Amino acid sequence: MASVLSVSAQTQVSRNSDFIVAVVDSVPITNHDVRSRAPQLRDQLKQQGKAIPEGDALLKAALERLIVEKALLQFAKETGVTIEDEAITQAEQRMAAQNQISVDALHQKVKAEGSSIERLRQNLRDQLTLQRLTERNVPGRIKVSDTEIDQAIRDRQSASVDINPDIELGHILISVPEKATESELSALQSKAQSVLAAVKRGDDFARVAKEFSDGSERDKGGLMGLRAASRYPTLFVEATKSLNVGDATLVRSGAGFHVLKLFTKRASSVMTVTQTHARHILLRPGGQLSQTTARAQLADYKRQIEAGKADFEKLARAHSQDGSAQEGGDLGWASPGMFVPEFEEVMNQLQLGQIADPNISRFGVHLIQVLERREAPISERELRELARNNLRDKKFEETYQLWAQEVRGRAYVEYRDAPQ
């Protein structure tokens, strides 16, 4: 929405050079409209990493965007989609907060750019109308089959072989005394290399382990058990991740020399999902508390916490305006999709212990801190639901474009003079 701020500043076309370039139903699109939209379209395509047309091609693309938009707005009018004034006021407040200015300063900025508050609010009304219209019409058109879900799960399981497979390692430890001399160390290294050579030429691993290993797995034939790679020592996982089943390698640690053989590697039988343990302080703008003031207050809390002058938990208990306040803002462990997107997106970008700048969601203004992350088992039902949601997200844009073109196709469009 912040792009509305610069609608007039992005291009200046004199009144004498403005003219109608197209009509959608009974709504005109002017040359000024197209030239104002073109820079916004260029920025949007750049952010999406898409090819950016230049010159007349860019103007033509901007015109087509406006035609679709006008057709959708007309369809919204016909189907009774309306936006309350209060929602527009809240959108103004969010825009001002995103630009870290007050609503009054936002209005002054818009006027200084040659636009008006009425134009700003109408732009916001149109954006909210399109958003509400999309929410009503697109999700129900997205179809995800069981076959697609099954394939997505198979793909995820295949990927887990590289991410966190179940593995079983054979381990033979040639221990090195803490104060071993150079000659002792050299002799033990030679012994370890001889053991490795025996394993590589196919000697029975269990027999070699029982004869030479100083490790606790010696009586088990050197086998460490089948389990997720994340439950093995990191040194062992790193040393064997590029091995094929049946291969062996030698690695050194503080305990000594380790001969490792990869016996099994397969997709984990237990699927996991990354869960996040976070906490927050929520302020809900309203009454005497504006969104700008709420952001400033939370920013001050962040400075105090990071300077060691305040405690996050105590501030949350005293000031947070939701049910987590009594828990010091603690939100517990959360799987993907449990929080609203605007909250989760910020949370997922944080490192452990990091506190985000105040951010806005539909519930208010948040100060978020991530405490922990973990891989947690996920049930078959949860896995299928996660796969379904991911597939729906991937199909959303394509479904939206098809639907928008259907609406555009039903509208009366008359092209006039080409935009300049």
Image (cartoon, grey):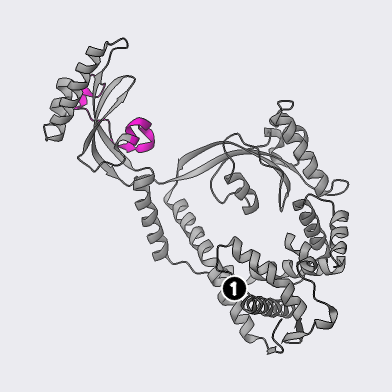
Pick the front one: 221 or 383: 221
Q: State the residue lying farthest toward the front.
A: 55
> Residue 328, how many percent across, how many down?
69, 33
Measured from the top left, where is residue 166 in percent x and y?
32, 41
Tell me: 9 left or right of 193: right
Q: Is residue 182 visible?
A: yes
Q: Please check the rendered image and state whether residue 165 is part of the magenta-colored stretch, yes or no.
A: no
Q: Quadrant of residue 50?
A: bottom right
- The residue under the point 87% across, 59% down is 107
> What secondary structure is marked by label 1?
loop
Identify whether 341 is placed above or below 182: below
Which quadrant of the view contains residue 203? top left
Instruction: Report the side of 26 relative to 381 (left or right).
Output: right
Residue at numbered disc 1: 53
Picture residue at 68% right of the left edge, 76% below the top: 69
The answer to whether residue 420 is above or below residue 174 is: below
Q: Quadrant of the N terminus?
A: bottom right
* Residue 1 at least partly seen: no
- Along the viewing direction, whichever of 111 and 202 lies nearer the viewer: 111
Q: Is residue 225 highlighted in magenta?
A: yes
In this picture, residue 23 sits left or right of residue 397: right
Q: Position of residue 279 (x, y in %)?
A: 64, 38
Residues packed near mark 1 inside 10 Å, few (<14), some (14 to 19) or many (20 plus): some
Q: Which residues, given as a range, are shown in magenta?
A: 213-238
Which residue occupies the foreground of this view, 171 or 105? Answer: 105
Whole-percent x, y for residue 91 in the image: 78, 59
Q: Is residue 296 above or below residue 67?
A: above
